[in-house]
Image: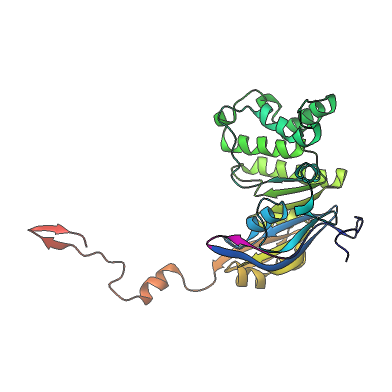
Amino acid sequence: MDHDSFSVNSAEPSLYADKVSVGYPERRVIETMSLAMQTGKIMALVGPNGSGKSTLLKAMARLLPVESGAVYLDGKAITKLPSAQVARRLAILPQGPSAPRGLTVGELVEQGRFPHVGALRMLRHQDHDAIREALALTNMTDFVHRPLDGLSGGERQRAWIALTLAQDTPVLLLDEPTTFLDIGHQLEVLDLVQQLNRERGMTIVLVLHDLNQAARYAERMVVLNRGQIVADGPSATVLNPTMLADIFKVRANIVTDPVTGTPVCLPYAPVGASASERLESLGPTVGKVAAQPVNGRAMFP
């Protein structure tokens, strides 16, 4: 594949990591990983804590430099593209985003239009339309004048999602978008993601901890473990008892959701010894705290 010049169509990746290694000063997290995100599809990244999901997403969005390899956006090396051009093609919601104190919801969402309006940042009619639509889609219209620091965690999360929608990009990367949301708002957000994909053809990558939600909303599931891809394919194939035992260390049954027809995992036991069995293996005195007399008083060791 000629990464410098190929044209994007439904069969070619809009975002592609080619043998990337990524990490932090104290350790390397991802080693020589390649991953292509097909145009117009929803892909879920799943895996245990520390497996490299968020690190990969940041590298794909140019928020974290790669140590080796390269990331390509629409066939071009993302490091060679102007920042404004990248921001018009790709939006990311990272974990734990922060904003200046006192910023209102409306002011936050306006920032999603900055890549489109030029250096003077003068909002045009179409920019105001995009902002209103993003607020409506996330049910945040009534919060437009509210300061972010006065909102609940779930309301703030929806405001940040509105920002990414106002950016109006064909590629959307969402790192745990359902964080802080109650179950009703979780489903609202994921239904919206699915709607954007079906109606606008958006390419969407989700990092999710809920495997059942990943299986329900993503056509493709990629499982990471210790910085490597260990499974990649349709959710119905990837979500299976063997993978769950090997990677997530749980024993589970897989059933079919009677409404959506997607797989649902039902964990029933951890893999390995239970907590009480591990304590017993350490000896009869472990877990028993004996009082030791010191100067006539009982003290705990």
Of 183 and 22, nearer the camera is: 22
Residue found at the very far left of the displayed protein? 296
Of 124 and 246, nearer the camera is: 124
**Residue 113 placement: quadrant:** top right
Q: How is the image coloured?
A: rainbow
Percent x, y of residue 262: 76, 58
Percent x, y of residue 88: 80, 42
Q: Which residues are magenta?
A: 20-26
Where, quadrant-wise, is the C terminus in this rendering?
A: bottom left
**Residue 1 placement: quadrant:** bottom right
Please tell me which residue is depicted at 21% across the width and 65% down the height of the picture. 290
Please tell me which residue is depicted at 11% across the width and 60% down the height of the picture. 294
Percent x, y of residue 268: 57, 65
Q: Count the marks: how many? A: 0
Percent x, y of residue 122: 78, 25
**Magenta stretch prevailing secondary structure:** strand
Within the magenta stretch, is there residue 292? no
Q: Is residue 77 above or below residue 146?
A: below
Visible residue check, residue 259: no
Visible residue check, residue 201: yes
Q: Is residue 37 above or below residue 181?
A: below
Q: Is residue 235 above or below residue 204?
A: below
